[in-house]
Image: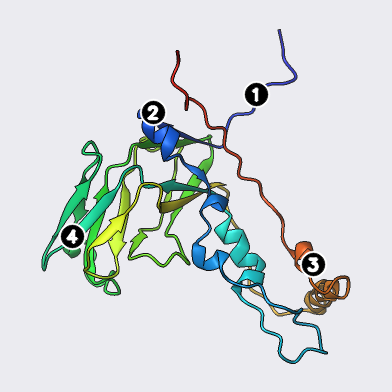
């Protein structure tokens, strides 16, 4: 029988064999991993167009673009406690889950591309998560900006509908110092997106462009504090966490 209520295929699927990881170190929307430094940041006490307050100080928290970034996609957290102990040439890796170990991409593969990192070897961590996307979708693997950690994920774009389901997590380290990552700490941010052919153009700025700018900037006259809601679109990154209970 034909159904008008055909179940929609998920855009992205994360699968893991380990029940304990699915239960206690789950993948969650990025909004669940806002950096503490951002949470502690005051928004500011006035609108930038409030001409009666010369002492206006607005912080990063008031930027719609940064808010969109921090809440976009999903985060893979550490599935176990990890520690990286560095030597002059390499490192020792300790973890509470011995099933998932590390390998490296040596410095010679990058030459001087990673010079801003003190430890210039890419550490590949075996991940328990297998990921695939719906047909036509890819995913951005992103470092966790605004998290003041010693490690940073290597950015990439992965075509999750055609590559193997399993991808390691690649980390670079800013300083050659012992680094502890606790279970649940964020490792990498993943944002799925639909692949499309993009066409761009460069041209002279026109009066229509100026009119558009003036019209949008006029929104601030509607509300001293809420006008930013008119220049950003909220995207919901939902997650259906299945198989987190042990069957009787």
The answer to the question of whether label 4 and label 3 lie on touching residues, with beta carbons closer than 8 A, is no
Residue 7: x, y in percent?
65, 24
Of mark 1 and mark 4, the one earlier in the sequence is: 1
Of mark 1 and mark 2, the one earlier in the sequence is: 1
Q: Quadrant of residue 98?
A: top left
Image-based side of 236 in relation to 85, left or right: right
- Residue 150, label in figure: none
Residue 15 in sight from this viewpoint: yes
Residue bearing the label numbered 4: 85
Q: CA distance from mark 1 to mark 2?
A: 26 Å
Residue bearing the label numbered 1: 7
Q: CA distance from mark 1 to mark 4?
A: 48 Å
* Picture quarter with the N terminus: top right
- Residue 226, label in figure: 3
* Picture quarter with the C terminus: top left
Of mark 4 and mark 2, the one earlier in the sequence is: 2
Residue bearing the label numbered 2: 19
Q: CA distance from mark 1 to mark 3?
A: 37 Å
Q: Secondary structure at mark 4?
A: strand
């Amino acid at each position: 029988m034909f159904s008008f209520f055909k179940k929609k295929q998920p855009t992205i699927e994360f699968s893991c064999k380990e029940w304990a990881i699915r239960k206690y170190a789950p993948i969650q929307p990025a909004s669940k991993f806002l950096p503490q430094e951002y949470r502690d940041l005051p928004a500011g006490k006035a609108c930038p167009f409030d001409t009666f307050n010369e002492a206006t100080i607005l912080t990063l928290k008031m930027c719609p673009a940064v808010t969109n970034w921090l809440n976009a996609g999903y985060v893979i957290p550490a599935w176990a406690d990890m520690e990286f102990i560095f030597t002059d040439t390499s490192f020792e890796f300790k973890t509470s889950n011995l099933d998932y170990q590390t390998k490296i991409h040596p410095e010679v593969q990058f030459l001087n591309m990673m010079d801003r990192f003190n430890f210039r070897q890419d550490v590949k961590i075996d991940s328990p998560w297998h990921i695939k996307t719906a047909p036509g979708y890819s995913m951005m693997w992103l470092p966790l900006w605004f998290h003041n950690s010693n490690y940073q994920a290597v950015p990439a774009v992965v075509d999750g509908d055609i590559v193997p389901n399993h991808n390691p997590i690649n980390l670079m380290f800013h300083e050659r110092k012992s680094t502890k990552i606790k279970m649940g700490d964020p490792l990498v941010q993943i944002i799925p997106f639909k692949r499309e052919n993009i066409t761009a153009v460069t041209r002279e700025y026109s009066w229509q462009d100026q009119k558009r700018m003036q019209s949008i900037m006029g929104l601030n006259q509607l509300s001293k504090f809420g006008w930013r809601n008119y220049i950003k679109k909220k995207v919901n990154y939902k997650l259906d966490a299945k198989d987190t209970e042990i069957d009787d």
